[in-house]
Image (spheres, grey):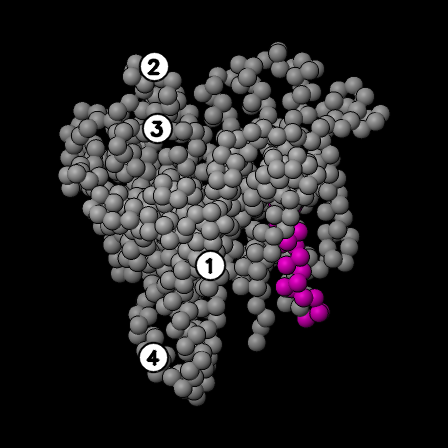
Amino acid sequence: MNQFFTVDVLTTTIASGIALATPFLLAALGETIGQRSGVINLGVDGIMLLGAFATYYVELQTGNLLLAILAGTATGTLMGVITAFVSVTLKAEQGISGIGVYLFGLGFSSLLFQKLVGTPLPIATLPPVGIPLLDSIPLIGGMFFNQSLLVYLAFLLVPVVAFVLNRTTYGLKIRAVGENPAAADSLGVSVARIRWSTVILGCTFAGLAGASLLMYGGIFQINLTQSEGFIAVALVYFGAWRPVGVMGGALLYGLVGVVILTWKSLGIIPLSASDLAATAPAVITVLALLFLARRFRQPAVLGRPYEREG
Amino acid sequence: MSERESTELTGATLADGRGDWARFVLTWLALPSALGIALLLGALMMLALGANPITGYRALLEGAFGGSYALSSTAIQAVPLLLVGVGICIAFRANVFNIGGEGQIAIGGLLSAATALAFPDLPGFILMPLVLLAGALGGAIWGAIPGFFKAQYNVNEILSTIMLNLVAVQVMNYLLAGPMVDQSPSSVGGLIPETRVLPASAQLPILVTGTQLHLGVPIAVLVAIGVYVLLWRTSFGFQIRSVGLSRSASAYAGMPVKRTITLAMTLSGAMCGLAGAILVFGSISHRMVTDGSLTGFTGSAGFNGIVVALFGGLNPLWTIVSAYLFGGLIVGGSALQVATGVPSDLVTALSGTIVVLVVSLEYLRRRARAQSMALAGRRAAGPPRLPRNAPPVATGEGGDQ
């Protein structure tokens, strides 16, 4: 245990925990926006896979990191258009259509990976960028202020999304559409248009989340996400539909994941028990769902397509 | 019966050609057209990847249905799909979404393997039913947890089942690498995460020599028929469907809504667990082995079973047909890969597309039905009849009362 509580190990662990939390955070923030407007998107995992693959492929072909991340993000946007059409316009059962999108993303990304890439090659990832002054603070600097730009962006988006949801007209419309679409409709707010925009935004975030996941590992493999997209959906419930709460959940997942890895490599816990330890976040999430289900209320019409009366 | 209902409606709305035609097309051709569109998309993907779609699909058909060996492989592949599919029928009919098939299969497989390891000396006619029951029990437990949480505390079952999948994969990796691992030298002394070869008396016997067709196939079909009877010929099945249509109305009618939801998820899990047991005891290696992922053991049956159930219209009998069809897609997918070099993951992508198409068409179907019902009501000059509520994901012709 003593090897764990050294400055170096702790700094590295927390720093990479934050980096690992980033894909969760991005995907969950996007899902939060959609769910506040009343739409559940269960296809996040598939969209992350497609986004990650697009990023990987463009990076392999062009060597241009910015272009690659943009491609991953745009893939998310494109999937957002499809998801919005199915969930909002065709009013499909969202719990199921999302599984369809997931299977599509899983199958299609594996297909393209094997066909177009074959042998996986590592790619260059975003370099860490120290924030001047802050990164030289002892301990804290190394943990928080020496990350890649994508990590900063993700955490900056937390207050931005919170501000948009709570303090802007657009955010008010999103919440109105998620709580009482009929009332919003009668006031002239287009329920469909708001939901289209939130779903596309959410899926764009999911695409970016896929790109950031790839940036964390630097290599693509089949089913790279290992259900992280589903966890991101659960984190929205975990965070009670509030961006800051969602961030807390993402950090928990990231840190627990990295701590287990570190303990395993330091031999603090035996290899076999690390499997059981790895169930901790999922168990915590189920318990959190259990307690939060009674304390916080979900958006009133979550998962229900809007049908104008009469 | 839906046929009766259709005739009733056709009689009333014959004059309204357009609405009726649309309803007919959407009711009877929705599923085939979903399949057709998906296959067309698949052809486009193959073209884009430089493969000949005709060669590809011919190889797929040949691989899935060409000859007795292919037919039996397809049947074997269809077994877990069918069992998960009928489990999904039960849950979805009660309007609870069981996305946890993957985990339930794994836990079922583990408990059945553990049972066989614990009682290796029992005679086959006791051990075999025992391991199958153990599998069903394991899945039932894994389904009961989210079911109970849903019923009692309104915990979103989609999320809790997905989380339990994540727990199940770690439990499986832990057990197969630790307490249940094969310590013998043939398995490199416990370095490979797999059980030792399970007692031969528990193996599902091969029914047709020269093929892989084992006892699991008739078992799965019988279970599917049993679930059909349960859902449409028993009062418990009526309760499940009633709760699925309206919880408040069922509660008002005095039905135990919470218990029904918990039991529906439990039964749904039991079906998946049984699939896990059959995967273990129908396997060629005669042991349970993990590659570290759920898919490695389940072959994604937990997700594909959803596709199969939807495609079977949430009717266990049609699910038999649909499971065989999708089993064929999976078996044929490998042949397609050999013939064209397009990875068999194409089939997964197509399954996803089919799910999206089926649930999208469902809305159009419901709308066409509501419209023609409203028309029929107006024609009859009586009070307008309310469209009978279809369960949210019902897609086929299972809705007879």
Q: Earlier in the sequence, mark 4 or mark 3?
A: 4
Q: Helix, strand, or loop for circle 1?
A: helix
Q: Is residue A120 magenta?
A: no
**Amino acid type assigned to the residue bearing label 1 in the image:** Leu
Q: Position of residue A132 (x, y in %)?
A: 83, 27
Q: Which mark is residue B8?
A: 4
Disc 1 from disc 4: Cα separation = 28 Å
The residue at which mark 3 appears reads as B289
Residue drawn 66% across the image and 68% down it = A185
Q: Earlier in the sequence, mark 1 or mark 4?
A: 4
- As displayed, is residue A182 above or below residue B140? below
Quadrant location of residue A255? Answer: top right
Q: Chain of mark 3?
A: B
User: Which sits in the foreground, B226 or B51?
Assistant: B51
Residue positioned 65% across, 29% down in the render: A124
Q: From where the camera sits, is residue A137 visible? A: yes
CA separation in Å, label 2 and label 4: 69 Å
Q: What residue did someone put label 1 on?
A: B357
Q: Amino acid at mark 2?
A: Gly
